[in-house]
Each structure stands twice: as structure tokens, then as C-alpha cells.
Amino acid sequence: MKITDFKAFAKSLFGDAGPEIRPMTSADVDEVLRIIRLHDSDDYQAAKQGFTQADFDADPHEQQHFVLIEPDEQRPVGVSGYYVDDLEAQGIYWLGWTYVNPFFRGRGYGSMLMHFVKRAVRSFGARKLYLSTSDLPEYADAVRFYEKYGFEEEGRLVDYFREGEAKIVMGVEV
């Protein structure tokens, strides 16, 4: 079953009492960029460029970002998504920007977003979900987080981001 109503899908996973997860809109960009900037200034710059050019009405089978709305705050406190990078690679998706505001960590929001994205791409017939990250020590928590959800390192590009910083490619069957 392909998902067409993401809000209803989130409620089916997390119930009425849980936080709202809905597709990101252009109105969410500033808050999402703030969340990303709290973590990483390089990712902030790349996300700023990407979301400025984003087509928020694109085919959700090819790309979509979601925001997690904290019930008490009524604003985005987390973001995640997916995209198809290569239309020839059937059933392959890439994890998009995935961040939770550090002031809201420890509430299971990252887990909710990860489960949501994995189930969403599975509904579209995904075989695998990939992501890329850095091998620098400050990304070790992120790598452990991804490993917790079944991602395994499948490749490493040495000196990719800059000399001494490799790009790690991780994947999981969905």
C-alpha cells in the first residue's frame, strides 16, 4: 500500500497522543534550518541551498521531507526525509536531512522520524535506504544512531569532504 496521507500514516504509527509528523512546507524552512544549524554549520549551508531550491510539491514517491511537531511547542523540532538520487537504481532511496533540536532529544523523536521514513519508502517499493555521513569523531553519535536502526557501513570515500575527513556511506534493507 502506497502512502498518500502522511498525517494519517503518522497517527496510525504513533496514535493521537503522539507528536504530529507531516510533510515539510516552505513555511517550515526557517525553523528547520535553525535546527540543522544547531548541529552543523556545513550542513546548514548545504540545507539552506537545497531547501531554497526545493520543490515542496514534488512527487512524494521521489522526494519528501517531514517535520515533527512537538505538541507543547506547536513548531517543528525535528526533520527527516528521503529522496531518489538515481531513477535507474530501482527501489533505492537516500535519507534526507535528519535532525532533532538538541533541546528535545531523549524523547524518542529521532526514532519516530526514522521509523516513519523507513516505513514510507517501503510503501513505495524501496529495497534499500542509504545515507552518508562523516567519519569525524563529532559524528560518532550519529553513526551509532543509524546503526541502531540497522544501517551498516557499505563504503568509505577517503578525504572526501576535506583531507582527513572521509564520507561514510551506510545502507539498510527496508
Image (cartoon, rainbow, N blue to C red):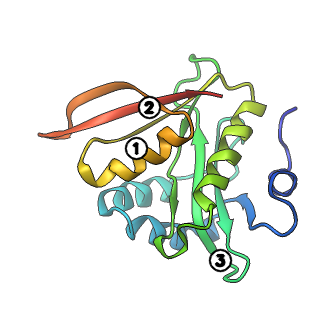
Is 62 left or right of 139, judged from the image as shown?
A: right
Which residue corresponds to the image point at 50% horizontal and 51% vertical from the top-left?
Answer: 97
Tell whether label 1 touches label 2 (CB within 8 Å): yes
Front of the two marks 3 and 2: 2
Q: Which residue is mark 1?
A: 143
Residue 73 to residue 77: above or below: below
Whichever of labels 3 and 2 marks the residue nearer the N terminus, that label is 3
From the viewer's side, name the closer residue of 51 and 98: 98
Secondary structure under the numbered disc 2 in the rendered image = strand
Question: What is the three-letter code of the residue carrying label 3?
Answer: Arg
Whichever of labels 2 and 1 marks the residue nearer the N terminus, that label is 1
Front of the two marks 2 and 1: 1
Q: CA distance from mark 3 to mark 1?
A: 27 Å
Q: Residues within 10 Å of mark 3 (few under 14, many from 20)?
A: some
Q: Where's the C terminus, which quadrant?
A: top right
Q: Which residue is mark 2?
A: 170
Question: What is the three-letter code of the residue carrying label 2?
Answer: Met
Residue 107 to residue 98: above or below: below
In percent of width and height, residue 9 lies at 84, 50
